[in-house]
Image (tube, coloured by chain):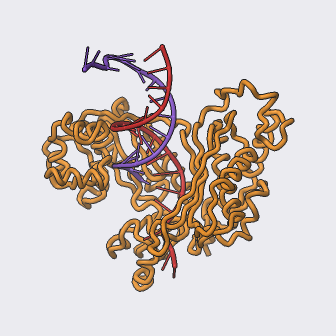
Chain colours: A orange, B purple, C red
Amino acid sequence: MYALVDCNSFYAACEKLFRPDLKHKPVVVLSNNDGCVVARSSEAKALGIKMGVPYFQVKDYCKHNNVAVFSSNYALYADMSHRVMNTIETLCPTVEVYSIDEAFLYLADYPAAMQDLKAYAKSIKEMIERHTGIAVGVGVGQTKTLAKLANHAAKKYPATKGVCVLDNEPWIRRLMQITDIGEVWGVGSRYKKRLAALGVTTVYQFAICEPAKIRQHFGVVLERTCLELNGQACIGIETVEPKKQIVSSRSFSHRVTDQQDLSEAICGHVAKAAVKLRRQNSVCGFLDVFAKNSAFSEQEKYVSISGQYQFITPTADTRQMMLAAREVLARVYKREVRYAKAGVILGGICQHDEVQLDMFAAVDSHECGDGSEKSDKKEALMAIMDELNSRFRQDRNQQPAVFIASEGIKDKQGWQMNRQLLSPCYTTRVTDLLVVK
DNA sequence: TCTGGGGTCCTAGGACCC
DNA sequence: TCTGGGGTCCTAGGACCC
């Protein structure tokens, strides 16, 4: 048995938490650069504001309906997420944090839960709401996919009061009959379309399909989904593994054409990605650089540039990685393109202590600017940098305490992200603490 | 005239998730 | 004028090996 706990309209709920005046008001939260709507409170959903819609298309409508609009405030959401997850971890020995606002709980060998699933699920919900002020839905089922389905029901049908346990056959069948196949975990828009062409539109119709046939037509992944809906667990609790790929990318607030600007942006991404890389004690074997103009524009042709640098010896040294990135950019840069987005991808990732050394390297790798530098010295330097930057947290302008000059001065970069509607970091910055008068 | 069989690795693209 | 960001897994096809 699995339970899925999922926060209701998480980002919007976080914003509301510190603004009691918004209690029953519509709230939406925007993606980076204030681009798209990525979270809506129930009131905003009722107004018909769709998930993922570009903000400029609904801006007037929001104003007209008194919708409170926020830029995304990740410092706040991440901190609230930790509080929710910490609470969940006190309630079950086996927890998988699946995303910023969701967690799976494995209940099968947890007798305290199995005794009375309904009561247990209800207690989880109440405890989280009491500890954090965040409302959640709880779904319980024989497999992860069924728990997801149950969670969907818990949110959709008020009669469930936010808790749904799928523990009897007729009920499961009924729910499947009234639920669209597109709601199933693992069925996206493409599969939904292809299934509809075969006359499969409800979860029930899909669940009674022959799994082998599903495999033939759609592959092994969807076959597993089908089996899971029939109570056969194919997907277990996953442990946290080091990332195999690390990406940092961002759209510009307005277009960039100059190579120096592009270079500063990309070096900024290298710095961020490298911090993530070192945090998981890894090194990367290659680094991809990419930049593109807008895929939406009708006036200009879509252009994307990209290139790769392979390190002879895998590295996690920011300076070496920046040199590589700048070399790639110089190679692939095209003038007269109005770049809208740029970023880097780190790949060929392995653990720091598993590195294959370069057999023909003279002493240490020559790739870093100063060939005489020993690798333990490089690591110490990076460690100090990370330590300083975590101790002296960057402020609103995003500039770290210590950084490589190639990143440029953030305050002078006109293309930096737009976040005009940012709320205070109520829980992570002393100067932003809520004052009650 | 007849041209094997079994395998690995890599990459690009497609699908999905939040 | 303005359209997010970060991931995973699977598959097919090509190159290559013995």
Percent position of residue A412, x then y: 74, 70
The answer, for residue A196, to whether it is visible in the render is yes
Residue A103: horizontal and vertical position, in percent? 42, 45
| A425 sits to left or right of A324 | left
Whether A313 is drawn above or below A300: the answer is above
Residue A169 picture location, percent across and down: 15, 41
* The furthest residue to the bottom: A64
In the picture, which quadrant includes the C terminus of chain A? bottom right
* In the foreground, A151 or A421: A421
Q: Going 76% across and 41% down the picture, which residue do you hit?
A: A383
Query: Which image quadrant: the N terminus of chain A?
Result: top left
Q: In this view of the protein, which residue sits in the foreground, A9 or A377?
A: A377
Residue in the picture at 20% in, 36% down: A211
Please name the residue shown 63% across and 71% down the image.
A435
Is A208 or A111 nearer to us in this picture? A208
In the image shown, does A127 or A228 lie closer to the viewer? A228
Question: Which residue is drawn at the image coordinates 74% and 26% (left, top)?
Answer: A360
- Locate residue A411: give its quadrant: bottom right
